[in-house]
Amino acid sequence: MGRNLPDGRREGLNDPARPPPLHDHAAFVRAETRLRPVPHASEISLHVADEATPLWSRTEEELAEVGLPPPFWAFAWAGGQALARHLLDHPEIVRGRRVLDVGSGSGLVAIAAMKAGAASARAVDVDRFALAAIALNAAANGVAVDASGADPIGRPRPPVDLVTVGDLFYERDLATRLLAWLDGFLADGVPVLIGDPGRSYLPRARLVALASYAVPVTRDLEDAEIKTSTVWRLVPAAG
């Protein structure tokens, strides 16, 4: 990101007026976010950013890469908030269970599972900064969460008792791969809960609504201040 300066330097990447890259994902997360209570799950606090676009640019500068995905880890998304609220309000869903949270982002749902009494929670996200954010957020909330950066979709399913998915059905190819992989858990008898405000590729025909929540969100991300989000149970395909 940035533009070429008259002397050939790249603004942002090597501008002496800017601090040098931190080369430390945890330090970057701390520097670019503030620890705040989650609007719809105030028992939990997360390191979150004020705005998405400037942070997106700074992540590319930090890694000297372009085309990186948005910093999903730096915000409490609507589906994740709904799912976290549901687990906190219904701890019997996770109590004593091994939970796998897919596309965990900030780690919000995994943290909620642990606070609700889960035996363990594994938060999976392929974003390098997300792994740092999950570790920091788990520590800030006094729980232990196992964070993994390996893409699990399409790979052998780990031995868990519950799978949670928040806000992942926003892209066609990802949704197709994810749903096929989640079907394997259903075949094994492992329930799958999905928190989602109605993203474009949500498999509505395969879902049973459990609860809906009016979730406060960031207008910069959702073009709204309140987003109705539903917690769904995924069911096997008919036939």
Image (spheres, rainbow, N blue to C red):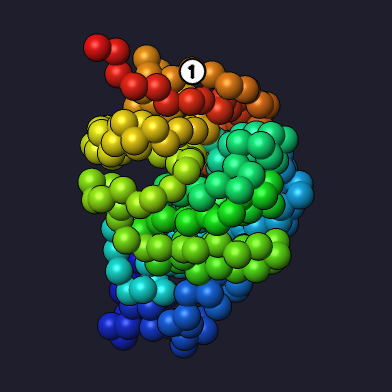
- In the rendering, at what x and y percent does residue 180 appear? 25, 34
**Observer-nearest residue: 118 or 221?**
118
Q: Quarter of the image holding residue 69?
A: bottom left
> For the point 40% across and 63% down, which residue is it?
148
Residue displayed at 55% across by 67% down: 135
Does 84 appear above or below 117?
above
x and y percentages locating residue 116 in the rendered image: 68, 47
Location of residue 210 in the rendering, given as x and y in whole percent from the top left corner: 58, 21
**Quick one: 214 or 67, which is closer to the camera?**
214
Q: Nearer the viewer, residue 2 or 195?
A: 195
Q: Quadrant of the N terminus?
A: bottom left
Residue marked by disc 1:
208
Image position of 145 (left or right of 57): right
Q: Position of residue 124 (x, y in %)?
A: 42, 55
- Image-quadrant location for residue 187: top left
Q: Which residue is at a point 32% across and 61% down the rendered structure image? A: 150
180 relative position to 132: left or right: left
| Residue type (three-letter) at the residue carrying disc 1 | Val
Q: Is residue 188 above or below residue 60?
A: above
Query: How many numbered discs sit on the rendered protein?
Result: 1
